[in-house]
Image (spheres, rainbow, N blue to C red):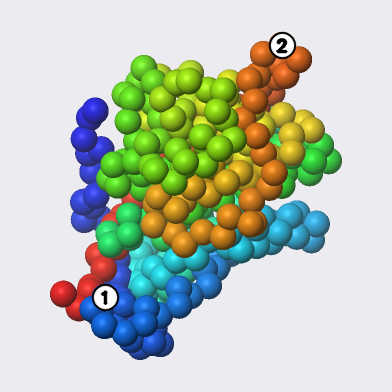
Amino acid sequence: MAKPNGIFFFAGRVLVAMTFLAGCGGKPDSPVGIAPPTPHLSIEVRYLSTLSGAQRAIVAEAVNKWTSALKKNLGEFRLNSAANDCFTGEPALNETHHNPLLFISVADIDGPDGRLAYTEICAMSSRDTLPLLSHIRIDRGDIDSMEERGVLRGLILHELGHVLGFVPASYIPKKLAAGGSADPHISGPAARAEFAKHGAWYTGATVPLEDSGGRGPNDPHWRFMVFGDEVMSSSIITGYRSPLSVITLGLFEDLGYEVDYTVADSYEVRPLFGDNLMLPEFSLVNDLRSIAPPAVLKTLTPH
Ligand SMILES: [Zn+2]
């Protein structure tokens, strides 16, 4: 597999992360004492475009779903970058955070249908290899029709999965992916264990990533022909339930989050042939854009 050139070292932006022990209840790496509770994770959402109240409510519900399932102390980090540094329309930043910052915009991508949205990861944590600064762009030509067809919720849930770490820049450095382009799959133990409970019929390497685009483990989606309507599958169809499964949450445990599996929706991996045949309506395969490698926030730890 080619080295993900440029992903981990990027000098174009000055971004500094600092981990503060104050407020954590003690040294998290102390050999004695009780480990401090992992703080609640939130996503700070900033809108760069006008969305209706109903559309914002859909975003808020999706954010709440993910942040109810995941906890993570990302430390404190400083965002310090010029306007338009990562994407057109990005404001200048000079502020401190301890939760991921997400911009959401609505703009023309390709008109009705085709591409519905995409996510850009602008900055990653060097310590946790997880995204810290992201942007979701929703196609102006699709947002209202997606809302009317009932797929906007599933789309936002899906893009948030990328925003929180279902991206190659997170799982490849953690050695959670294997299989090359022939049979890409996530090899993390928690994801595999959850898949085994809910997809015992599948005899291939688990957990299968999308293989139709030929990008191997760099395609950050579950394989549609195995996963069907699961929220991190590579396609979306009107009428989709888009369940957030324990399998996806297993991957997030493998990525380093503390996970509450009770938040997951009911889901079973089912063969997509015969009575269960589904055809993809809209592909999400290319919805993770990498115009430039994400900046890496250097975490200053006590050691
Ligand atoms: Zn996607």
Q: What whole-number distance in Å separates the C-alpha atoms at marks 2 and 1?
A: 53 Å
Tag 2 and tag 1, C-beta contact below 8 Å: no
Q: Is residue 23 above or below residue 128?
A: below
Amino acid type of the residue that numbered disc 2 sits on in the rendered structure: Gly
User: Which disc number belongs to residue 29?
Assistant: 1
Could you say which quadrant of the image residue 80 lies in? Answer: bottom left
Amino acid type of the residue that numbered disc 1 sits on in the rendered structure: Asp
Q: Residue furthest left?
A: 303
- Residue 172 position, x and y percent, is 31, 41
- For the point 52% across and 42% down, the residue is 194
User: Which disc number belongs to residue 274?
Assistant: 2
- Residue 42 position, x and y percent, is 55, 68
- For the point 56% across and 60% down, the residue is 260
The secondary element bearing badge 1 is classed as loop
- For the point 24% across and 28% down, the residue is 1
- Front residue of 85/180: it is 180
- Residue 244 position, x and y percent, is 63, 46
Q: Earlier in the sequence, mark 2 or mark 1?
A: 1
- Residue 264 position, x and y percent, is 64, 51
